[in-house]
Image: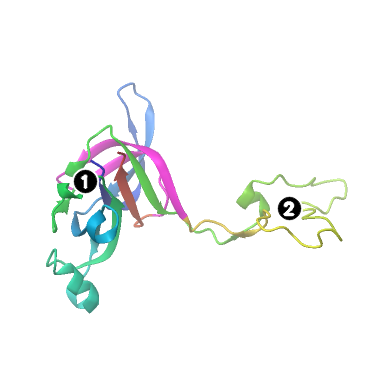
Amino acid sequence: MSTSIFGKKLGMTQVFDKEGSIVPVTILKAEPCQVSQIKTIDTDGYNAIQIAYSHEKLDRISKPQLGHLKKATSKGLKSFAEFRTIDPANFKLGQDITLESFTEGQEVRITGKSIGKGFAGYQKRHNFSRGPMTHGSKNHRLPGSIGAGSTPGRVYPGKKMAGRLGGKKVTIKTSEIISINLEDQIIVLKGSLPGKVNSILKIQSKI
């Protein structure tokens, strides 16, 4: 059964595996999420589960959101997301989704927003090689030619040029769960994950 949960990125560290090799890991704090809506083919045209997360004070949540939450829970949750599922009957309205749905060694899919790096040049954004630094060259980090002259007389869309770098939705297709601490709701995942500290990441099990 495919399920999803959201966690806050606490940072990175390293652990040692059974063979003594160093493994870089990312630590997440996964607070319990609640099922706020169950969507089926009959009512919505597809099977999906909507979950609510990120606790917030009730007086800081809009009335439409409060009305939606009252159908499932009395807690203040400000963010919503959904994931597809084959059989929505496995879930109940108001059900808590915790780390108990995951196991150590399981492969999961991680989605988050990458760190924004502002306006970046060609070398940093697209890994372009620089020009010569000596012999009178004045083309060190310039783009060079970006297209022909009279024909077509314009720059084709999609040309790799300088611009904003990062700050986009990124998905890690496979990340292994190294360990889970159910008491503190801590999950340790292998490798680096998108986003900076305190950013929210989506942890989704593979079907």
Residue that appears at 20% across and 70% down: 68
- Element at badge 1? loop
Whether residue 49 appears in this view of the structure is: no
- Element at badge 2? loop
Where is the N terminus found, in terms of image quarters? top left
Point out residue 186 in the picture as x, y percentages from the top left corner.
23, 46
Other residues around mark 1 within 10 Å, as few (<14) / some (14–19) / many (≥20): few
Q: Range of the magenta residues? A: 169-196
Point out residue 129 in the picture as x, y percentages from the top left corner.
71, 44
Other residues around mark 2 within 10 Å, as few (<14) / some (14–19) / many (≥20): some
Q: Amino acid at mark 1?
A: Asp
Magenta includes 178?
yes
Magenta includes 41?
no
Query: Where does label 1 land, which residue?
Result: 87
Label 2 vs label 1, nearer the camera: 1
Taking the image as shown, residue 3 lies to the left or right of residue 183, namely: right
Point out residue 73 in the picture as x, y percentages from the top left corner.
13, 64
Counting residues from the start of the chain, the first of labels 2 and 1 encountered is 1
Where is the C terminus found, in terms of image quarters? top left
Residue that appears at 32% across and 27% down: 17
* Disc 2 to disc 1, C-alpha distance: 54 Å
Query: Where does label 2 land, which residue?
Result: 141
Question: Is residue 49 depicted above or below 176 in this figure?
Answer: below
Of residue 152 and residue 107, the one placed in the foreground of this image is: 152
Of residue 52 and residue 92, the one placed in the foreground of this image is: 92
Question: Is residue 74 depicted above or below 142 in this figure?
Answer: below
Q: Amino acid at mark 2?
A: Arg
Taking the image as shown, residue 144 lies to the left or right of residue 46, namely: right
Point out residue 134 in the picture as x, y percentages from the top left corner.
83, 46
The extreme top residue here reads 19
Residue that appears at 14% across and 63% down: 72
In which quarter of the view is residue 24 placed?
Answer: top left
